[in-house]
């Protein structure tokens, strides 16, 4: 995935917009529930902390061999910013992550957004998708499974590595869901 791959994406109900500092206030509010940190640790970011984080992520990886792709999720029905997805991509592997704020959970939005991200990553030529999921985080495991990822015996910081090989060549998904 190249930096020119950081384009707006679209799913059935969501606009996935490249993350920028302008999203910090809304993102901090959407992710303000401490329960979101049950499996990842930490606490909700203040708007100022979120602004600094958004600016850092939008600036990109300091390693030129690694691309950071971060998109906020905007629900088209009401314009609410509901979470984010991200992909950390090296030449052959994309590590995916997804977070949807508590008020919007249970509606399939995380799966929908993660699917749009996975399709986009696959269309850019990345061959492997991974996610690291806490063994007790059953909701994230369901999302990973829906994306075709499978748990492996590998662990990183106590989390299970889930993995899928992505299609390449003819028949590969195209980035037709990209907008802009």
Image: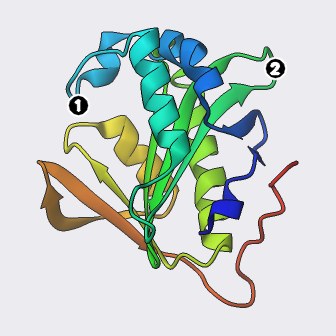
Q: Quadrant of residue 2?
A: bottom right
Residue 94 located left or right of residue 20: left
**Towards the viewer: 43 or 58:** 58
Q: The residue tagged with tag 1: helix, strand or loop?
A: loop
Q: Residue furthest right?
A: 180
Query: As drawn, is 179 to the left or to the right of 84?
Result: right
In whole angstroms, how far apart are the C-alphas of marks 2 and 1?
A: 29 Å
Q: Residue at x 50, y 47 (%)?
A: 86
Whether residue 108 is visible: no
Give the SS element for disc 2. Answer: loop
Which residue occupies the foreground of this view, 142 or 71? 71
Q: Position of residue 95 (x, y in %)?
A: 40, 59
Q: Is residue 138 left or right of residue 51?
A: left
Q: Residue furthest bottom?
A: 170
Q: Residue at x 50, y 79 (%)?
A: 127
Identify the residue under disc 2: 77
- Comparing 87 with 117, the one in front is 87
Classify mark 2: residues with Cα within 10 Å, few (<14), some (14-19) or many (20+). Answer: few
Label number found at residue 58: none
Where is residue 180? Give x, y as percent.
Answer: 88, 48
Numbered tag placed on residue 39 in the rendering: 1
């Amino acid at each position: 995935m190249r930096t020119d791959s950081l384009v707006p994406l679209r799913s059935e109900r969501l606009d996935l917009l490249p993350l920028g500092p302008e999203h910090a206030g809304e993102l901090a509010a959407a992710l303000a529930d401490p329960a979101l940190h049950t499996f990842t640790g930490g606490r909700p970011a203040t708007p100022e902390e979120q602004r600094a984080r958004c600016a850092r992520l939008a600036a990109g990886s300091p390693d030129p061999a690694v691309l950071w792709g971060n998109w906020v999720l905007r629900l088209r029905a009401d314009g609410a910013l509901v979470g984010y997805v991200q992909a950390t991509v090296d030449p052959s592997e994309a590590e995916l992550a997804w977070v949807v704020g508590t008020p919007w959970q249970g509606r399939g939005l995380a799966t929908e957004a993660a699917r749009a991200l996975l399709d986009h990553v696959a269309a850019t030529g990345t061959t492997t998708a991974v996610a690291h999921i806490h063994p007790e985080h059953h909701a994230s495991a369901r999302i990973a499974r829906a994306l075709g990822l499978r748990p492996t015996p590998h662990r990183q910081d106590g989390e299970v590595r889930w993995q899928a090989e992505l299609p390449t060549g003819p028949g590969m998904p195209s980035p037709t869901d990209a907008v802009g």
